[in-house]
Image (cartoon, grey):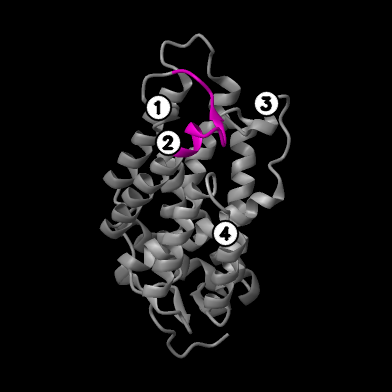
Amino acid sequence: MADRRELTRLEAVLDAFADRLLPRVPDGIREFLAFGIKQAWACLFGALMLAAIIATSWFYPDDAAVARNDFLVILAVLIQIGMLAARLETGREVIVIIVFHIVGTGMEIFKTAVGSWDYAPGGVLHIGAVPLFTGFMYAAVGSYIVRVYRLFDLRFSHYPPRWLTVIIAAAIYINFFTHHFIVDVRLLLVAATVVVFFRCRMYFSVHRRTLRMPVLLAFVLVAFFIWVAENIGTAAGVWLYPSQDEGWHLVPLTKLVAWFLLMMISVVLVTIVDRPKPPDTYTY
């Protein structure tokens, strides 16, 4: 069970309710339900953003006074304000989200300038070819990771030295830019990440039980769900890759490499704010 001191006021109420309700169901189902509820809660910001993207692709009128891109910016800001006003996020989470927003927007400005992908035109709330809501999509990743970190009371064994992870994460971020001009070393960076995190295990508290899994597997799983969200975004016409100009198709699975590396950066950013903790004595 997550440390109650780390929960927001609403989460403490939900946690107390779960303590009364979940013991009435069998152990396996109880843990499964608790895992699903916590994951859904951690995904709240990203889920709301995806819902807005899908809904505007279906229902938003082409001749609206406010361009769809600008409307998505407004919705993203309102979602963020609402979560802060309702105290659904802690101060540390807000710091991480802001950092993700800045880091993501900076990369978006460069990537659109070199033609890696294109956003639908329209609106006035943009920097260059980048609508301002795109920073919130990266912030959604940061929001998920930092909330999972807290809700599941994540602990780590054999966590590598943070200075080493910072160096690799910085190299990954730089390579996102430099591979357009010099040799692309992303596979080398994947190998470095695998070597550094190979022994690392993540311990996560579900409800009554705490489980563990390799951190690298967690990287791959989250990268896959980001890839799914990316396909939803391109299918909704928010942005397209050059290969999709003639007709939409699934984003190649090879893009998982980029999202795997993004997970490395994301985890490092979170651990700068919240130092990785070693595991206590847990039962599995």
Q: Nearer the viewer, mark 4 or mark 2?
A: 4
Q: Circle 4 — which element?
A: loop
User: For the residue carrying disc 1, how many other residues have a C-alpha within 10 Å: few (<14), some (14-19), or many (20+)?
Assistant: few
Q: Earlier in the sequence, mark 1 or mark 4?
A: 1
- The span picked out in magenta is 110-122
| Residue that label 4 marks | 185
Question: Farthest bottom residue?
Answer: 281
Q: Earlier in the sequence, mark 3 or mark 4?
A: 4
Does the stretch in magenta take in 117?
yes
| Residue that label 2 marks | 109
Q: Residue at x 54, y 70 (%)?
A: 193
Q: Residue at x 36, y 74 (%)?
A: 163
| Residue that label 3 marks | 245
| Residue that label 1 marks | 128
Q: Position of residue 28 (x, y in %)?
A: 64, 74
Q: Earlier in the sequence, mark 2 or mark 1?
A: 2
Say which amino acid is labelled 1.
Answer: Gly
Q: Which of marks 3 and 1 is nearer the N terminus?
A: 1
> Mark 1 and mark 2 in contact (Cβ < 8 Å)?
yes
Q: Circle 1 — which element?
A: loop
Q: Circle 3 — which element?
A: loop
Q: Position of residue 234 (x, y in %)?
A: 62, 34
